[in-house]
Amino acid sequence: MLAIGLMSGTSLDGIDAALIETDGDANVRPIAFRGEPYSDAARAQLAAATALALTFDRPRASPDLVAAGELIDRTHAMAAHKLLRDAGIEASDVGVIGYHGQTVAHRPDRGWTWQIGDGAVLARATGIPVVSDLRSVDVAAGGQGAPLLPVYHAALTAALPKPVAVLNLGGVGNITFVGADQRLIAFDTGPANGLIDSWVEAESGARFDADGALAAAGRVDETVLTAMLDHPYFDLPPPKSLDRNDFTIQPARGLSPADGAATLTAFTAASVADALSHLPERPRRLIVAGGGRHNPTLLAMIAARTGLTPEPSDALGWNGDAMEAEGFAYMAVRRLNDLPISFPGTTGVPQAMTGGVVSHP
């Protein structure tokens, strides 16, 4: 089946759109991918909506959140149409869209997670069935609702020697451990690019630390780093998950721009090292996806703190920018086939279960 995955992450940089052919099981063939950046105005609107959502005790209608949801629907429909045009594929040939939407608040400790974006609206706009709201069923069953990509990581690593780990460095980091017996363990490691991006934007107006250059020019403040690592999250056993806003750049305030970037980059690396200590055995390989794989300073710090050489996923022939979007396309097909997308070892649900709401055009 041809399937589209649409993903907008907590970094708010834009939409990832991927087209794959898959049976939702062992067969996966990537076909096309495109990234659609948000305008500065869209980023500001989504950031404001997220800040507002985090003040609510539960998801509820609000004019600003409704408007942000309409923005998400509109831009994702456009991204899907552009992807099909690039691939030379008709919408009628696509079986399903996996629509992640935009996370504005993730509060599994309160029994909810909130992704804006309406699957029914997207289905009407594209003429393609849509699977959306993939996290809520998991959270309602007592799971963390994240991370969901492990089932796709397992498919991608099927032929690799085990144990193996896949580290995704997006706004928040998450790791998937695949054991020799195909056992899956996954959890959020901590902030990945999120704090670094926030720091660089606050200090210079840039969107991110290109090539890790600013961090490379600075020195890690060990006192600040130690204080940041003294967070109760790191003592929790997996599975566990984070909202990007659970950590802030405040502890680094007062450092120079370069030293702050270096310290926050080291914090991400140290959180990855801590995550490895929660795994049942040391992985043979650490494969890295997400935007953080482009940051050589971050990868060098991860190597120094873990003793493993982070391997950018592209070296294995995977598109590291497309993996999350591909994963949601894959999970949408699994949902149609009533196959599980979350597991006790990945989100903490009592039993393997599927998830997502199906909307037809």
Image (tube, rainbow, N blue to C red):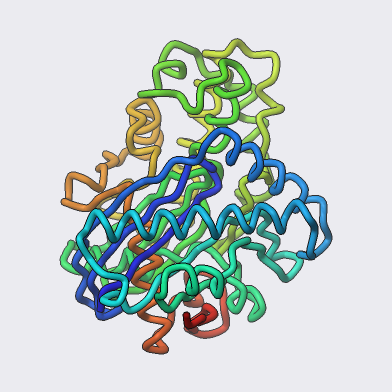
The quadrant of the rendering that contains the N terminus is bottom left
Q: Is residue 37 left or right of residue 211?
A: right
Q: Position of residue 185 (x, y in %)?
A: 43, 66
Q: Is residue 293 depicted above or below 75 in this figure? A: above
Q: Position of residue 275 (x, y in %)?
A: 48, 50
Q: Is residue 156 depicted above or below 332 in this figure? A: above
Count the numbered circles shown: 0
Residue drawn at (51%, 77%) of the image? 344
Q: Position of residue 328 (x, y in %)?
A: 40, 66
Q: Position of residue 298 (x, y in %)?
A: 40, 30
- Most extreme residue toward the bottom is 338
Residue drawn at (55%, 70%) of the image? 121
Location of residue 332 by image quarter: bottom left
Q: Is residue 109 left or right of residue 86?
A: right
Residue drawn at (63%, 73%) of the image? 139
| Depth check, front residue: 3 or 298 | 3
| Depth check, front residue: 205 or 360 | 360
Whether residue 282 is visible = no
Whether residue 87 is visible = yes
| Depth check, front residue: 350 or 2 | 2
